[in-house]
Amino acid sequence: MADTAEVIIIGGGIIGCAAAYYLARGGVSVIVLEKSSNIGDGGSSRNGGGVRQSGRDPRELPLALYGVEHMWPMLSEELGVNVEYHKEGNLRLGKTDRHREILQGLTDRAVACGLDVNMIGGEEVREINPYLSGEVICASWCPTDGHANPLAATLGFYMRARSSGARFITGEEVLRIEKVKGKARKVVTAGNVYEGGKIIVACGYESRALARTVGIDVPMRKELIEALVTEAEPQMFPQMLGTADADFYGHQTEHGSFVFGGASGFEDTNEDGGRNMTMSITAPEICRGIMKYIPKLAHTKIVRTWAGYEDVCADGIPVISPVGEVPGLILACAFTGHGFGIAPVVGKLLSELAVEQETFLDLREFRYDRFIPCGA
Amino acid sequence: MKRYDLIIVGAGPSGLSAAVEAAKRGMRVIVFDENDKPGGQLFKQIHKFFGSKEHRAKIRGFRIGEDLLKEAAEFGVKVVLNATVIGIYPQKEVTVRIEGVVEHYKGDAIIAASGASENMVTFDGWTLPGVIGAGAAQTMMNIHGVKPGRKILMLGSGNVGLVVSFQLMQCGCEVAALVDAAPRVGGYGVHAAKVARTGVPFYLSHTIVKAEGEDHVTGVTIAEVDDKFQFIPGTEKHFEVDTICLAVGLSPMSQLLKMAGCEMEDNPRRGGQVPVCDEKGRTSVAGIFAAGDVSGIEEASSAMIEGRIAGIAAAEYLGYMDSGESEQAIKEQEEALEGLRQGMFAPQNRGKHIETTDEGIQISESLLKKGYIGDDEIERYPGVRHTVGIHPVMECTQNIPCNPCQDACPKGCISIGQNITSLPIAVEGTECVGCGMCVASCSGQAIFLVDEQIEEGYASVTMPYEFLPLPETGTKGKGLGRDGSPVCDAEVIKVQTAKAFDQTHLLTIKVPEDMAMKARFFTF
Amino acid sequence: MCSINDRSRDIGEYIPAPDDDMVICRCEEVTKGEIRRAVHAGLFTITEIRRYLRAGMGLCQGQTCARLVKGIVAAELGSVPAELEPASSRAPMRPIEMEVFGNERIG
């Protein structure tokens, strides 16, 4: 089989898989190269499954809105895989006056962007979710937020892309991108050279090193965060939960298990030994956070914990951008932990960028060359 | 954080042995075990172990466990039970669930001795209640005193399947059949023989088609398989049983080591995913060691030696022994381990079909296919001789590393010689006094005292007997042949019970003269 | 260790088998047929199978079914079980109640 395609995508996460799907569906030849043995081995399989609009940077909001309105509700049908999308609201919980202030600020900013978010009191919170502790005094409530299953969505995009003709190669680590006659063209791995008219780099934090091979830098860092999953419980509540204090976030899946994420506070300095290692102190801290808000889960068993990297951008929103200086190169990285909810939208946008179509949403805010000091 | 020189995960044979060796050298050692009783699988092993006298042959497994615990206590090892290690983290941090608390510990070294879990095979109905692991059955009866079922079919003719079948009968269950897809018995012939002589039929080249029942097992159908393990139509056999025991191998429980970042390999010869280890049990992570089944499935005797080696290696790693001392100590253990890994069941022979013994004698095909030695085959073994008066008959026909019988006889009637795997021979010119020590000392229950003529037309056969109720002198019943079928009327003429026999009773039955070399069990 | 795995390579068609409805992962009630079909849909690794079907992701974390799943996946791929990378091992090694997990003694 030829190692040449119209588009080479580096990174088999949900962004790369979604882009591959929309391209392949449009008849464009695609090769996806994934370093890991598994599709979606990075943040795509390790995130909390939030499909939120609230709490987003206003610049990112149009993508989130578009996804919730036009893509997520149809995605299961489109992919032929139940992605377990539930649009049943997001509660961001508060227990103190300080929390109330934080939540009010978030709510005000969301409302200013035209989002349906409002502050509600403790009683109303418990009407929505009777399992929440009496200590919860307020919440910001966004009824159109929701959650989905990241594993099913990622692998769903992969399987549909594959059956639509996209070629996927896992265990194939890209070492560098090379230019030919001024254009990004070659993708070099340890044993092979792939060639594409367009090269999409969508491999999380590793995108930085690859972009550098053609002289482009994206200011981002990586942060290891953790999550856990419980045994299955009878269905309790469908909302996505978060807190003003960021103790934890998460939801109950269709399967009945709860997926919760959180932090120990030492994330900046944690090291993972190169294998997404969890820390001994994090999951217990997440558990304590959860029990403060949902006391009924105290006896629920944790069956697994895991860790994953966020590619955190210097200014908090991703880079989704053709690189003018390196024609043929398209970057999609630095999603800063918000990538899953907008992944279908980003995938579709990338498919348009790759065929030089005008995109259905304005991507100016996500330019790769926006990183200049305020005073300049 | 609480810190120990050495944290050991698992208080089974290897973990406790490692603890003893390390503590002996002055190390502060703590052992965690998730069970409420220590000893791992050892405490389930009510049978006598094989091996050499130096390595506790003919001692029952649970007693070895008790001795190890006592030894560990003497050297100040702290054994914490109901303590589940839930994670190993960088800097050798170990988190342990103890009751309602998760405690964090650090060790300068860690030995994982977490053992193995039972494999399952799938067949129609394999998830029905009543389909259980043979090890689980053993735990139920020997640890908790619960009878696993009334009528049982055992799948698997390795040592676990054979030993557990015997123990099931000891606890009062009926074993309807012993089944294995392999064409030959996998475990020791002596274990097979002691099961077969009670009347349990062996079905080699057979496996389970279906477990029957609505909400629990009420029956099972087996069928013969061809050399590609495909069922041969028309060979189905049905048994009404309430329990199906699966003794189809073990898988190392090595997840903790993987989590700790040790390099792993999938090694079918070691039973699955195991850490890459050197001969001292050192994994790829400095200071983390592995011993026992977690690093490769073997049996308890090897696990104990591996544990000792890992304990010594940990002592050396932390400077509690200099390398000269440890080399010497490890060398001694390795020699012992080498001794155990001899004979036709040695790891290097796994899967091989061995047709003759080291002595050049043909292995009994009947033993391998039906579980018992044919009456026409028994005479070819050097332990089987005919002399006037009482004398031992050793129906030990495979080269296994075991020699307690030669020390058991005060008169020197039995010899194995220098090579521990040699077959025992009846020494010419010696005189048996009929003390029965050899009978009780044989872990394989393969030695009988025979007097081919106690009176006109009658012979006596003295056999090991480990069932209840114990018949009394004068009890009349049937003598059973090696295949478990009744061959003659028999009467108990002597029942011996002695402390030195360690709960193996000696039953002497009177049988017709021509049955002296045929009757090998007694029912009444 | 990752080896290059072309996900478009031909592994043949999925052919229904009489034992496809046999439960393999008891915790999550995943059948042999589901596993086989997932392999043919492109899920060539144990980790992907676990993530997609939850086989081995329940209370026992694959203690019982890991070996069985590996055998099935290997057979569909025309490979041998030892060549399939096992799933990662994660704490807690045994399921643990939230109130216990959160009740630490670190000092």
Image: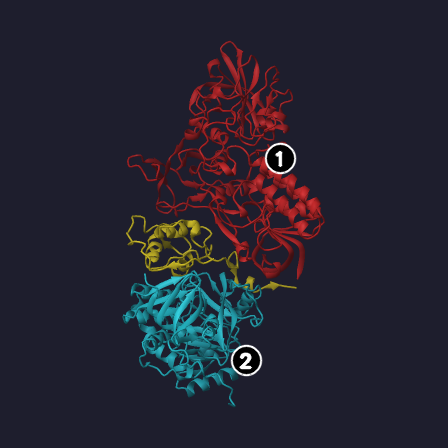
Q: Nearer the viewer, residue A149 or B21?
A: B21
Could one spot residue A361 in this view of the protein?
yes
Residue lying at 40% horizontally and 40% vertically, measured from the top left = B242
- How many numbered marks are there? 2
Q: Which secondary structure, mark 2?
A: loop
Q: In which image quadrant can residue A236 be found?
A: bottom left
Which kind of residue does numbered mark 1 sit on? Answer: Arg
Residue underneath mark 1 = B56
Other residues around mark 1 within 10 Å, as few (<14) / some (14–19) / many (≥20): some
Q: Nearer the viewer, residue A123 or A5?
A: A5
Which kind of residue does numbered mark 2 sit on? Answer: Thr
- Please tell me the colour of chain A: cyan
Residue lying at 61% horizontally and 27% vertically, measured from the top left = B418
Q: Nearer the viewer, residue A256 or C1?
A: C1
Could one spot residue B524 in this view of the protein?
no
Q: Quadrant of the N terminus of chain A?
A: bottom left
Residue C9 location (% of width, % of height): 33, 57
Residue A141 location (% of width, % of height): 43, 79
